[in-house]
Image (tube, rainbow, N blue to C red):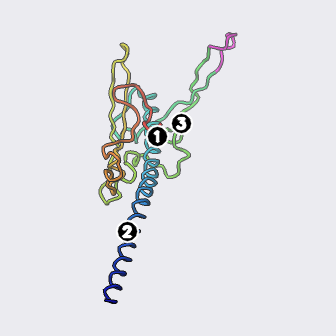
Amino acid sequence: MKTTKIIVQVVLWIVIIVLAILIFRSITDPLKFQNEFKRRQTAVIEKLKHIRSAEQMFLQVNNRYTANWDSLADFIEFGKIPIIKLTADPKDTTFTVFFRDTVGYKIVKDSLFKNISNFNARELKYIPFSDITGTPKDTFLIRVDKINKGNVWVNTIEVSAPYKSFMKDYDLDRYGVDPEGVLKFGSITEPITDGNWE
C-alpha cells in the first residue's frame, strides 16, 4: 500500500514536471520564433534595400531596370555614374537656370556601397538564411516590365523573398505565419519602388 502511494506520487510529480515544461515551452517558443523571424526579416529587408538602390541607379543610367542578376552585378562593379556639377547662370536673376557639367565619373559600387564592409555584388541575389537547412541558396524573385500609365510608358520592377525561403527550418503554419507571404519592394503593375515593410 505504501509502495503504491509512493509510485502514484512519483508519477504525479513526473506529470507535473512534464506539464510545467510544456506550458513553459508554449510560452517561450512563440517568443523565440518572433525574435528569430524579426532578425531574419531585418537581414532580408537590408538586402532588398541594396537591390533597390542598385536597380534605381541602373534605371537612371540605362533607362530601364534589369531582371538579370549578372548584369546588375556587373553594373555595380564596373558601371560608372557621372558626377554632375550644377552652376547657376550668372545672367539669371531668378536662380532657376543652371548649367550642368560632368566633372568626372564614379564606380557604382564606390558610390552606393562604399560604407558596407565586404560587400559582394555577386551575392546580392541570394536570400539570407535560405541555405540554413543545408539546401542551396534561394535567389530573390525579380520581375521587370514596362506599362502604359496615362499614355506614358514607364518602367516597373518587383523584387520579392517568400517567408518560406528564409524561414525553412520553421513550421510557419504552427506560428500563424503564411508561408506564401513575402517581403518585397515595387510592383509589376504600378511605377512604385516602396517596400511592403515601410
**Amino acid type, callout 1:** Lys
Q: Work out whether 72 lies above or below 60.
A: below
**Amino acid type, callout 2:** Leu
> Picture quarter containing residue 152?
top left
Tell me what residue is drawn at x 61 percent, y 17 percent: 98
2 or 3: tag closer to the N-terminus: 2
Tell me what residue is drawn at x 64 percent, y 20 percent: 87
Q: How far separated are the C-alphas under marks 3 and 1?
A: 21 Å
Magenta span main SS: loop
> Which residue sits furthest bottom?
2
Q: Residues within 10 Å of mark 3 (few under 14, many from 20)?
A: few
Q: Which mark is residue 106?
A: 3
Q: Position of residue 29 (x, y in %)?
A: 41, 59
Contact (Cβ within 8 Å) of mark 1 with mark 2? no
The residue indicated by pointer 1 is: 49
- Nearer to us in this view, 189 or 173: 173
Q: Work out whether 186 lies above or below 20.
A: above
Which structural element holds mark 1?
Answer: helix
The residue indicated by pointer 2 is: 19
Q: Which residues are magenta?
A: 87-96
Contact (Cβ within 8 Å) of mark 2 with mark 3? no
Q: Position of residue 52 (x, y in %)?
A: 44, 36
- Nearer to us in this view, 165 or 12: 12
3 or 1: tag closer to the N-terminus: 1
Q: Work out whether 22 lies above or below 131.
A: below
Per the image, is 89 magenta? yes
